[in-house]
Image (cartoon, rainbow, N blue to C red):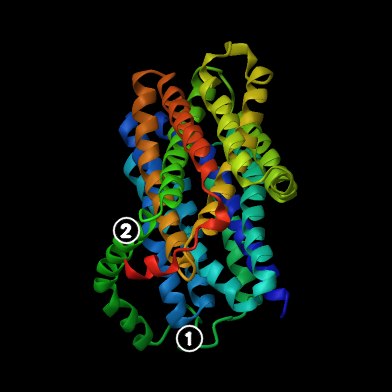
Amino acid sequence: MKKSPLVILLLTVMLDLIGFGIVLPLLPTYAKDLGASPFMIGLIAAIFSIMQFIFSPLWGKLSDKIGRRPVMLISIFVTALSYLIFSQSDTILLLIFARGLSGVGSANIAAAQAYITDVTDSKSRSGAMGMIGAAFGVGFIIGPLVGGLLKHNYGIEMVGYVASALIFFDFILAVFFLPESNKQAKKFHIGMFSGKSEASGSANSSSSSFLKEKITEYVDGLKLTFSSKPLALLMIANYIFTFAIVNMQVASILLWKEYFLASDQEIGYIFAYVGFFSVIVQGGLIRQLIKKLGEHKLFLWGHIFTFAGVFFVPFIPQDTLFTYGLLILLCFAIGTSLVAPINLSMISLYSYKQKQGQILGLSQSVNSFARIMGPFSGSVLYGMNFHAPYIVAGLLTIIGTFIAFALFKYKIEALEPVAEAESI
């Protein structure tokens, strides 16, 4: 196995996520400065996830046809263009368009994961996939720091320019150093994005049936999942936990800015602080804890820590954001870093044999739906009362805690009804 293509791929993913992290913490307050209503702020936050949900499987499927390299190149270029448009977004409609276009480009994660499966064997694949998770953490440490510094000192235009330049550098790296990994794909030559019409035509002709196909897969996946009580509980926990976190993320940025009077630069520090401890937990500590305590106990404690990390945020005194607030956010970083990966791990462990891919795919879809709906809820609730998003998030994590308790009665190794799964 050649390691260099994987290194270049992970570098491009990390640069992409740093660009994402530069812009993300500034969006809600900038949208509000443009006159956006709570609903519109929710839409601006959600449009990225909506486009990712639509285009992620399309990019993945297209990469099977024409190759990973052209899909990665085109999507990276689209992302760089979106940040350039963002730098000039002086109206709400233009800001929505820029974020939607960014979601289209950043949906290349499916193609990136497919690239990893092409260049790794079964033994090294999990580690390589884990590196993508680490790239997310690095992006959320470096990106917000840079974004807050740029916005504070040079304005929103410079934020867009730097993010665009970073992603365009990512594009140049991929052009020169990222080889094609899918040897079975139809040839697709990229000079200035010119390709064989046969490949693109084939992709376009299948697009009409793709939606029906995905709906059928989704319904079948739900039937399969809800035929098992622990799987059903985990899938419900996945949705409500993701919804709870996204529900309060948009509200948090507004709260830090308006109630705690934090600057854009200080908000960047907060994001980097949470990202730093998330990387520590997910980068190795979680494996040791699983060996010592097991998935069930960690899943429970993750929800308890997360409750402490979301519910109490708006109730601390205004001048304690960087004292009591940091302690609460430490709980948030620990809790979310435990719950999300353990939920995915437990879904995999409880899944029917030979059906893991389908069930894990459904889990990603459920997660995406929560990321689409959460920003609307958080923005509207914040507009009603700034305590509301955190109270709702806290209540949802309590429900997740009860689900975690309920899962203790189901032994992981006892769940293997393969024949039942096949009959559904």
Q: Nearer the viewer, residue 338 or 134?
A: 338
Q: Quadrant of the C terminus?
A: bottom left
- C-alpha separation, residue under disc 2 versus residue under disc 1: 33 Å
Give me the disc on residue 225.
none
Residue at the location (66% across, 53% down)?
134
Q: Is residue 89 above or below residue 151?
A: below
What residue is shown with label 1? Answer: 185
Residue 304 seen: yes
Q: Dot 1: within a 10 Å radius of its alpha carbon, few (fewer than 14), some, or many (20 or more) residues?
A: some
x then y, percent, for residue 143: 62, 45
Q: Where residue 422 sits in the image (x, y, percent)?
A: 37, 70
Residue found at x 43% / y 49%: 367
Q: Residue 193: in sight, yes or no?
A: no
- Picture coordinates of residue 312 (x, y %)? 54, 19
Q: Which residue is mark 2?
A: 223
Q: Is residue 102 above or below residue 421?
A: above
**In this rendering, the label closer to the viewer, 2 or 1:** 2
Q: Quadrant of residue 38?
A: top left
At x 37%, y 35%, the residue is 41
* Sooner in the amino-acid sequence: mark 2 or mark 1: 1
Disc 1 is placed on an element classified as: loop
Q: Image check: 2 left or right of 13?
A: right
Residue 259, horizontal then vertical, whole percent: 51, 17
Q: Answer with left or right where residue 58 lies relative to residue 145.
A: left
**Within-10-Å neighbours for mark 2: few <14, some 14–19, many 20+:** some
In front: 334, or 251? 334
Q: Residue at x 31, y 83 (%)?
A: 201
Query: Which corner quadrant of the image does residue 362 belong to?
Result: bottom left
Left or right: residue 77 versus residue 50 is right
Q: Amino acid at mark 1?
A: Ala
Three-letter amino acid code at disc 2? Answer: Lys
